Image (tube, grey):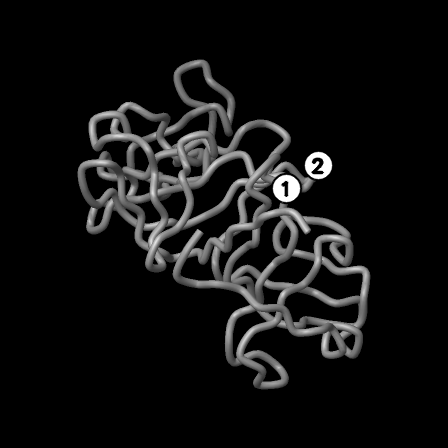
Amino acid sequence: MAETTQFTIGAEVRGTDGALGELTRVVVNPISKTVTHFLVEPKHRQGLGRLVPLDLVEGTSGGEVRLHCTKGDFDRLDFAEETSFMPGVDEAYAGYEPGEVYAWPYFGGNASVPVTSVAVPVGEVSVRRGDPVHATDGDIGKVEGLVVESKGHHVSHVLLQEGHLWGRREVAIPIEAISTVDSGIRLKITKQEVQNLPRIDLDRSSS
């Protein structure tokens, strides 16, 4: 079996010279089922998260995710979020058609609040803790994290949060049972088949 590393979404992230923030999302290529980036957001600095390429991830230690980059290196990475503004008027204005006019909300009028989205690479999707997991016959639980192969960054399992349907401490869904990863995770198997999955041992404290 390929060597794997478990990444819990919500884990602390540290660089070579100190704490960097929290792992808030994992970016996955839905075709190859490989992880491409982590989204790391500094604590108490919402909106300043960065897209961290998997090449910078060393592994985990004591439940923390370790990166081989400094705080300065981290700050130079691409931002993980982008903000746009929804159309702010219902009528044409100054030669522009409705839907072409965008406005800052504090200038008054009918402008709506900014809309923030995750700036993932084209063709890829992000997975966050709490995203729904759907079996073929209904919702089965929520995402806690992923198990990723050390070589190739392929996802081997998706972890369900504790306290799910059957009260088992942890359930790991093999990647072969996953149909799609988009606005949640959809499975090829039923709730009963998830319940019958074998237990696997996962080390939360080391890579």
Q: Position of residue 170 (x, y in %)?
A: 56, 74
Amino acid type at circle 2 is Ser
Q: In the drawing, does residue 132 fall left or right of residue 108?
A: right
Circle 1 — which element?
Answer: loop
User: Which residue is depicted at the point 63% across and 36% down?
Assistant: 29
Q: Please tell me how many numbered marks the rendered image carries.
A: 2
> Which circle marks residue 131 in the picture?
none
Q: Nearer the viewer, residue 36 or 83?
A: 36
Q: Which residue is mark 1?
A: 154
> Which is nearer the N-term, disc 2 or disc 1?
2
Look at the picture and state if 177 lies above or below 155. Answer: below
Question: Which residue ends up furthest to the top in the rendered image?
Answer: 95
Amino acid type at circle 1 is His
Pointer 2: residues within 10 angstroms few (<14), some, or many (20+)? few
Q: Position of residue 34 (x, y in %)?
A: 63, 39
Regarding residue 88, the answer to whether it shows in the image is: no
Determine the CA span between mark 2 and mark 1: 8 Å
Q: Which residue is mark 2?
A: 32
Q: In the drawing, does residue 182 fall left or right of residue 143?
A: right
User: Which residue is depicted at the point 23% across and 30% down?
Assistant: 70
Q: In the drawing, does residue 47 fall left or right of residue 120?
A: left
Circle 2 — which element?
Answer: loop
Pointer 1: residues within 10 angstroms few (<14), some, or many (20+)? some
